[in-house]
Image: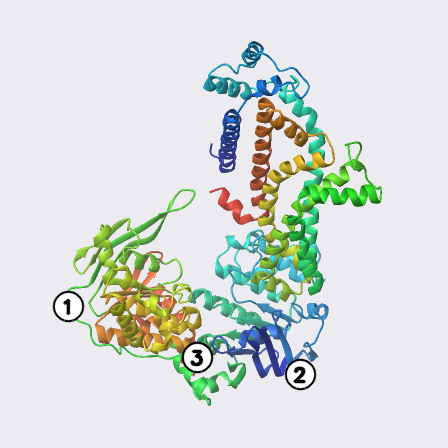
Amino acid sequence: MTNPTARYLLRRVGLAVGVLWAAYTVSYVVLYLLPGDAVETMASGGLDGEPLGPAEMAALRARYGLDQPILVQYGKALWAALGGDFGVSVQNGQDVLSAMGDALPSTLALAGTALVLAVLLGTGLAIVATCTRSRWLRQALLSLPSLAVSLPVFLIGLLLVQAFSFGLGWFPSVGAKGPSALVLPAVTLALPLGAQVAQVLAASLDRALDEPYVTTARAKGVGRVGIHLGHALRNAALPALTVVGLLVGQLLAGTVVVETVFTRPGIGRLTVSAVSYQDIPLVQGIVVFAAAVFVAANLLVDLVYPLLDPRIAQGATR
Amino acid sequence: MSLLEVTGLRVEYRTAAGPLHALDGVDVRVEPGEVVAVVGESGSGKSTLAHAIIGLLPANGRVTAGSVLLGGEETTGLSEKALRLVRGRRAGLVPQDPTVSLNPVQRVGVQVGEALRVHGLADRRSAAVRAVELLERAGLPDPAVRARQYPHELSGGMRQRVLIAIAIAAEPALIIADEPTSALDATVQRRILDHLEGLVRGTGTGMLLVTHDLGVAADRADRLVVMSGGRVVETGRTADVLAGPRERYTRDLVSAAPGLHQVVRENPHRDVDTHAEPLVEVRDLVKEFRLPGGGTLRAVDGVSFDIAPGETLGLVGESGSGKSTTARLVLRMDDPTSGEVRFDGTDITGLRGKAWRELRRRAQLVYQNPYASLDPRFSVEEVVAEPLRAFKVGDARARRARAAELVDRVALPASVLDRRPVELSGGQRQRIAIARALALSPDLVVCDEPVSALDVSVQAQVLELLTELQADAGLTYLFISHDLAVVRSIAHRVGVMAQGRLVELAPTAQLFDAPQQDYTRELLAAIAGRRSRETV
């Protein structure tokens, strides 16, 4: 490999594979160490079912391979996972990948919309707050993010439902039918994330505006808005971009709460049910998926850096 | 009509400690085609004046009285919108530090073109073409290539030329140059000032040159405005002010300026016994650094010299010449790639562990920046006594007594012992750094640019102190500086470094009066103040 960019990419992809393996293994160990197993959960038969006898339990364990030594189980599972086979859900026997595939589109729509909203809201707020000459407006705007960050997601969701669904009746409060059902969940998810973007961006915009090159630009006769958009924003974008990469992790965690509050189908709801049933194959699938999304998002962020700052581009080729 | 007429200008900064009067009734005039230099030490208000003229005061500063007429029109009290039409178009600014004054994420051509576009003098396409022309006028080689580059790909001198191109872009009648070259090497400084002066004189533009360097002002300006404490102390034709300063402050400033005089102190030192066994012997010293992306850089390339006990050897050179790396090798703070350093007869290049620590006792360092080299959380007493603690010398009481004695030796009152470094001035801090270096009674003190961060009058005092300490304690100095005038006033012998090599090494008087190498001659010619000395 002579191309440094390709070498850099290759190293990052190697690192990503390592992270995915670690996520798989750690989740496997943790789930294995939990008391009881999936068969016991199924065998309890719920509230009204008849408990299974020991012979039937043993048969079930053999069927799922749970009677083999743990290392053998792990090795087999890992080998299968490498081929994309995460096994079948112990809840309903559905293939793990197809179960996740069914839930994915709805979650993607939710998380994607929320991320775009969060970035737009955060950037807009930070720019207006640092650009305004009204001290009062600046203070007011800059106090919003800490408010949004400190409110729990479910509370934001319930407040929004109360106001816009029960009160004004603009948007449905549950379900996933049509774009209008997406609005409230996406806003709920976006608010705390956008707040973090706003906090980081406003702070780094303020720092950038103190730099001597801003004085140079002002001395040319460039106005406030021109300085903000033409000079400060791109310099201030790097820290905010780093935050956006990390937010993708929070976004996935947030879908668990938001999909539950708004009764939307999706990966978040799937996670809740998988965990409560100790559906180890499904949980494993979701964990690896989440890790993959997170790693991919941050790799993407790293690749965008040099486009924003030419000094990093030179460093990356070293 | 004057190009610029400032009368009775007062500027106030709101600070936590109450209002601070940065300018207290300042009068300055600049005629078309004239260069007026505003000189003064830090805190004199000269930069505030430069910024106030085009309404660029920081948020906590405001003009409280007086007027600024630029081309006959008042600029104080203008709205931000009206000021935008003045800035760049009527008065261009060349800012202080070229390394941080350009937007790092924008190509330099775009930044030059912006100065035209904001005033509607070019559209996107013609701005790109004009930017290349302007860069060429500012004296940048390969302007078309440079215009496509980012600031970090250009040297400090090139970046200053970009900033000059920005300042002249909209053809303002007045150029305000705020310490335009103080961050640059002497030879680069001279070329840039020559160029800037040519641009101004050729077009009838006026220039207000703000500088702390009286030598620079003396070389360039038609008239001098001397500022101190927010007031103008003296003003007049440059030659008149230099030849016969009326005010005491100006006299002190003129006599402290190292470059302005043929001789500040022609070897005030005792003679050095050059036949004695040298304290330091450096032989064929080489230091290579591996460059990222392959290749090596020879920072120090076959350097040899001796330093006799009680001698001061000056090492001069521009940035990147290898002088600081040489100093670090002499102190064994870095390992040489090859070559030998002997300290008092012992080869120290392979010293490890305990022996290496013992060397620290005998060879100490005084750094360039007295603001960064003192721990802000220590009291002065703790700073000075730290080497004693590190080497477990004496008990707490003895160390306290020693600290008091050292502070007294660097001519500071005992009351500073309980204060923190932030409460002291730059000159006081550098004295504290010297006291710390002397704590273990070393034989050798390596001074790396010890006065370059200080005002000239303070510089002179610190140099005086170093000379006295040498006479009292028989200290040996390795004195690193980019400033030839400073080295001349303290060193017995001077070595000139360029690209890692020791180009010339000679007794001070001989090097300055009869330099043997072209490079040395070029360096000497670049000393600011030399031109005025020849004509006055």
Q: Secondary structure at mark 2?
A: loop
Residue A265: percent from left, percent from top: 72, 29
Name the one closer to the observer, B173 or A288. A288
User: Image check: B270 left or right of B368?
Assistant: left
Question: Residue under circle 1?
Answer: B275
Q: Earlier in the sequence, mark 2 or mark 3?
A: 2
Looking at the image, residue B344 sits to the left or right of residue A262; the answer is left
The numbered dot on residue B476 is none
Q: CA distance from mark 3 to mark 1?
A: 40 Å
Tag 1: amino acid: His
Residue at coordinates 59% horizontally, 69% vertically from top-left? Answer: B93
Q: Mark 2 sits on what residue?
A: B1
Which amino acid type corresponds to the residue marked 2 in the rendered image?
Answer: Met
Decide: few, some or many residues near mark 2? Use Cα within 10 Å; few <14, some 14-19, many ≥20.
Answer: few
Q: Is residue A288 above or below residue A118?
A: above
Front residue of B44/B304: it is B44
Chain under label 1? Answer: B
Q: Position of residue A118 (x, y in %)?
A: 68, 45
Residue B511, by quadrant, is bottom left
Marks 3 and 1 share the same chain: yes
Q: What mark, if any, has residue B532 been given in the picture?
A: 3
Q: Is residue A200 above or below residue B60?
A: above
Sequence-first tag of 3 and 1:
1
Q: CA distance from mark 2 to mark 1?
A: 68 Å
**Mark 3 crowdedness (10 Å alpha carbons): few <14, some 14-19, many ≥20:** many
Q: Is residue B313 visible?
A: no
Q: Amino acid at mark 3?
A: Ser
Discs 2/1, front = 1
- Figure disc tally: 3
Q: Are marks 2 and 1 on the same chain?
A: yes
**Picture quarter containing residue B443?**
bottom left
